[in-house]
Image (cartoon, coloured by chain):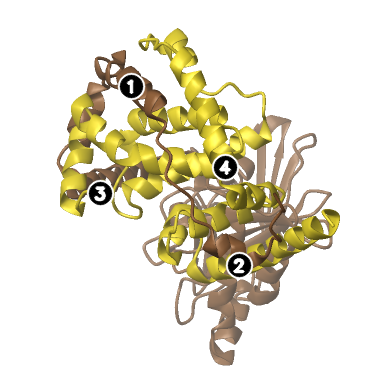
């Protein structure tokens, strides 16, 4: 679900102090962010935890957001990228999983049983897409910078301008990273093909 | 199942189905929207952030303006509070004066050399190179050199130095308006240069290790004016003795000696080898007196001195 620019701007202003307005933004962008994280990370529980963190930050930092340089969705992607970096930098870091949110912010605790079952189901579903799983296995061997660009380009189908907005890098840099990233991925794939002979 | 061979076109052709984490989405939504965060909205920001992008921009510009003003006020305050004898200020003053001097025409420079009795560009170059260069205010200057209190005056036939009102014919160099540079020259002498408001050196003097003081002064008297230069010797541990000489195109050099013994109780003034009684009311211990030679007469602080036997 996408909304037009004017509607989104008004919604963002309202969402700074109105939970219902924030709920509309959440509904619009949760699928994009959660899927991006599922594509970037092999574990669905980690992807879900980081999704929680992205929207928690999106809610509490919304007053710092302005429309001048970056769209709201790109801003959420940016937060997601930062959180992924944090995750890889310090894997034991405790993310704002729903339980954690409840303990520290008095959020209502949901029944997590169904959610855990859902994580398993999601991983199974992703595993059925053999092509995706094989590529993902090779992708995560690349430096984060290339992972970010390649996933945004090929799984999220972002154009170069959008990738530039999300990463804060200029178009030429994006083109160059994309080209080098593909080269590196090709090498990894060839190595994998050699090993599996 | 046989494993498909991986190649780079795979990534471009792979279709990834959108997955809905429905349970997580609902749970997170409920948690976020019912969070106490919404009750704790920082009201202080509401005024600040409402009104959209334009107001945000204005507010940011205003904030930046306030921050800039605060920084500027702090900067100005620090500069105002810092004493002017900082090395940087002294270096700047020496440089400015040097620039003024080197920009003079050769003719103007010659006139200035004659007036100052030394090469002002060399003097200022030496000041610039000095490691201990400092700038003095008038108060700091008179504290360090109490023998010179108010200023000099020069006229065609007289050389005067002192704190008392000058003779009407003389022109006063108002030392209050001067800036002073102090430094040690290559010979180890302490040098002080007076710089006027136009950044020209107007006088300079140096003191040697034995207390000898050599002084030059810019001629303020115009045509027929007479540059004063003198030598003073003083030593607080011994009876004070000052010798002043003046070159005079008309009358030749005037040689003055002031001797004070017993803490200034006994005072003798000798002008060109002739002794004069110190006029009543003149206290030589408070500073160098104004001595003028008009024709055959000598005036001390404007009072005609009587030759002593």
Question: What residue is disc 4 on?
Answer: A128
* Side of B74 relative to A22 (left or right): right
Q: Which residue is mark 1?
A: B32
Q: Are marks 2 and 3 on the same chain?
A: no
Q: Return the residue nearer the eye: B222 or A54.
A: A54
Locate residue B186 relative to residue A148 in the image: left or right: right
Badge 1 element: helix
Marks 2 and 1: CB-CB under 8 Å? no
**Neighbours of disc 2 within 10 Å: few (<14), some (14-19), many (20+):** few
From the image, tell me which residue sits under label 2.
B9
Residue under the image location 33 percent in, 29 percent down: A59
Residue A185 is situated, as x and y percent measured from the top left of the image, at 69, 60
Chain identity of mark 3: A
Q: Are marks 3 and 1 in contact (CB under 8 Å)?
A: no
Q: Is residue B20 visible?
A: yes
Across and down, in percent, residue B147 comes to 61, 46
- Callout 2: helix, strand or loop? helix
Which chain is drawn using brown? B
């Amino acid at each position: 679900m996408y909304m037009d620019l004017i509607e989104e701007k008004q919604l963002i202003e309202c969402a700074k102090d109105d939970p219902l307005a924030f709920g509309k933004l959440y509904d619009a962008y949760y699928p994009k962010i959660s899927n991006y994280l599922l594509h970037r990370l092999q574990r669905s529980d980690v992807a879900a935890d980081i999704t929680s963190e992205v929207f928690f930050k999106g809610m509490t930092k919304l007053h710092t957001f302005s429309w001048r340089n970056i769209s709201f969705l790109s801003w959420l992607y940016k937060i997601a990228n930062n959180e992924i970096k944090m995750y890889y930098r310090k894997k034991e870091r405790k993310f704002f999983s729903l339980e954690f949110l409840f303990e520290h912010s008095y959020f209502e605790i949901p029944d997590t049983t169904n959610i855990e079952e859902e994580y398993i189901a999601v991983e199974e579903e992703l595993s059925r897409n053999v092509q995706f799983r094989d590529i993902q296995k090779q992708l995560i061997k690349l430096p984060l910078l290339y992972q970010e660009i390649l996933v945004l380009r090929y799984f999220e189908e972002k154009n170069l301008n959008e990738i530039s907005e999300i990463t804060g890098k200029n178009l030429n840099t994006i083109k160059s990273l994309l080209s080098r990233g593909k080269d590196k991925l090709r090498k990894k794939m060839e190595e994998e093909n050699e090993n599996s002979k | 199942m046989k494993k498909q061979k991986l190649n780079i076109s795979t990534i471009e052709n792979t279709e990834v189905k959108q997955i809905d984490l429905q349970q997580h989405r609902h749970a997170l939504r409920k948690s976020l929207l019912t969070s106490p965060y919404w009750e704790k909205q920082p009201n202080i920001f509401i005024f600040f952030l409402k009104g959209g992008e334009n107001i945000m921009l204005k507010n940011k510009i205003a904030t930046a303006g306030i921050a800039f003003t605060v920084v500027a006020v702090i900067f100005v305050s620090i500069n105002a509070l810092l004493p002017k004898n900082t090395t940087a200020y002294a270096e700047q003053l020496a440089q400015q004066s040097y620039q003024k001097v080197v920009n003079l025409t050769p003719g103007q420079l010659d006139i200035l050399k004659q007036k100052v009795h030394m090469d002002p560009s060399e003097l200022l170059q030496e000041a610039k190179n000095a490691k201990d260069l400092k700038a003095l205010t008038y108060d700091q200057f008179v504290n360090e050199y109490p023998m010179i209190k108010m200023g000099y005056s020069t006229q065609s036939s007289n050389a005067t130095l002192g704190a008392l009102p000058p003779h009407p014919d003389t022109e006063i160099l108002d030392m209050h308006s001067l800036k002073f540079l102090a430094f040690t020259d290559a010979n180890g002498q302490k040098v002080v240069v007076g710089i006027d408001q136009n950044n020209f050196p107007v006088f300079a003097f140096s003191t040697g290790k034995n207390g000898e003081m050599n002084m030059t002064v810019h001629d303020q008297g115009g045509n027929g004016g007479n540059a004063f230069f003198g030598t003073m010797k003083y030593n607080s541990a011994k009876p004070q003795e000052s010798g002043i000489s003046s070159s005079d195109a008309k009358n030749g050099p005037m040689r003055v000696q002031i001797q004070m013994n017993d803490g200034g109780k006994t005072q003798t003034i000798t002008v060109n080898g002739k002794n004069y009684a110190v006029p009543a009311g003149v206290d030589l211990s408070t500073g160098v007196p104004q001595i003028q030679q008009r024709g055959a007469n000598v005036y001390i602080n404007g009072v005609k001195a009587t030759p002593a036997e």
